[in-house]
Amino acid sequence: MTYRSGFVGIVGRPNVGKSTILNYYLGEKIAIVSSKPQTTRQRILGVLTRPEAQVLFLDSPGLHKPEHVLGRYMVEVAKSVLEEADVIVAVIDGRVSLRPEDERVFDQTRQALEQRASSRQHRSALLAINKVDAVKKPKLLPLLKACAQQRLFDDCIPISALTGEQMPVLLDAIIAHLPEGPRWYDPEHHTDQPASFRISELIREQVLIATHQEVPHAVGVIVDQIEERPRVLAIHATILVERDGQKAIVIGREGAMMKQIGSAARQQIERLLGKKVHLGLWVKVAENWRDNERVLRQLGLFRYVSEGKDVTIQDHGNPE
Ligand code: GDP
Ligand code: MG
């Protein structure tokens, strides 16, 4: 039997369910998920080891029009995932008609395919039509027909990452298109994210769930300290926001919001680490941190863009 392995880039506009797909296949929360766009800010590796293949999923931030250094970084990361992938899985939301942002994703997929073709490396693209649990099946027919008529995708597969419907079909298609290759990672190894980054993400996820409008975008989380104490792990983290008003929202009346965020995040972290956790949270205002490269590095961003090289973003100015 040929063993297959390679990178599978999950790409698409924000909020179509890319991270939910990754988590479904890995059976654990590798990437945080929320109903707010631009939840994923980083390239996230999820390693799925099977008897016949090792699938190296790369979850990516949604391709969007960036407004900050952070946003430009996110778009760079998404592009690097397109470049690195052996199999591209472009994800769309099957509940709604195609948007210009989806078309842009298709264009970039096409470019990535052409690039590889010119270097004679094999690469394929699949279209995952997600969220079909919320669609009446006949409504999908025109989309499937249109997809079959163009030559970009090798396969167009309706799925639901929420219910798992057709997810094995997508996985089989992914594996069938992977190149021959070795088992790169130990099967126990599920991701390359440091524990501190996963902890900060679980805290940020709870802030995203609890807040609305511009607040989720303005939130960053830094884990300051992880301290082993008898029978408990003490974690101290800072939640960054951009304005006093946002700080007041995150803290809430008499600290009620903080309490809710802290307790939900603590439970998630305990589940991840399998240990009892004491979580201390601070909220700090850092104006325009999304344009501050130093802060972005503190947040664990600016890691591995195209094989470990840091991304250089020329324009550091505020685009306003
Ligand atoms: P991403 O920005 O593309 O990574 O999207 P997420 O994975 O963060 O998901 C965005 C939202 O879509 C979340 O609220 C998910 O629960 C929801 N979602 C993801 N997959 C499905 C699905 O198959 N069906 C439905 N109904 N919702 C989904
Ligand atoms: Mg995501």
Image (cartoon, rainbow, N blue to C red):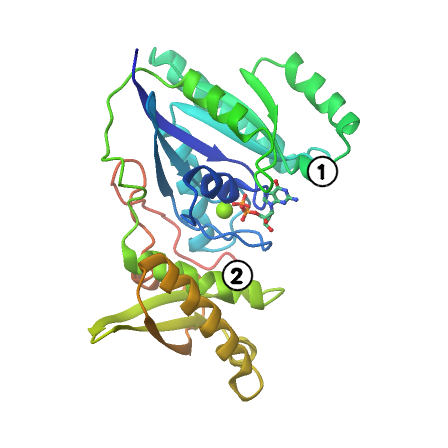
Quadrant in the picture for residue 7: top left
Asked if residue 80 lies left or right of residue 98, the reply is: left
Quadrant in the picture for residue 16: top right
Image location of residue 82, percent across then percent down = 42, 30
Up/down of 153 relative to 222, above or below: above
Q: Which residue is mark 1?
A: 95
Asked if residue 142 lies left or right of residue 51, the reply is: right
Q: Residue at position x 56%, y 42% from top?
A: 17
Q: Which residue is mark 2?
A: 217
In the rendered image, the quadrant that contains the N terminus is: top left
Three-letter amino acid code at the position of disc 2 = His
Q: Nearer the viewer, residue 111 or 174?
A: 174
In the rendered image, the quadrant that contains the C terminus is: bottom right
Q: Can residue 296 be seen?
A: no
Q: Is mark 1 within 8 Å of ligand 1?
A: yes
Q: Is mark 2 within 8 Å of ligand 1?
A: no
Q: Residue at position x 29%, y 60% from top?
A: 196
Nearer the observer: mark 1 or 2; the answer is 1
Three-letter amino acid code at the position of disc 1 = Arg
Image location of residue 111, percent across then percent down = 47, 22
Residues at marks 1 and 2, CA–CA distance in whole angstroms: 25 Å
Q: Nearer the viewer, residue 31 or 83?
A: 31
Q: Dot 2: within a 10 Å radius of its alpha carbon, few (fewer than 14), some, or many (20 or more) residues?
A: some
Q: Residue at position x 34%, y 27% from top?
A: 50
Image location of residue 222, percent across then percent down = 34, 67
Which of the labelled discs sits on residue 163, or is there none?
none
Marker count (numbered): 2
Q: Can residue 319 be seen?
A: yes
Q: Dot 1: within a 10 Å radius of its alpha carbon, few (fewer than 14), some, or many (20 or more) residues?
A: some
Asked if residue 275 lies left or right of residue 79, the reply is: left
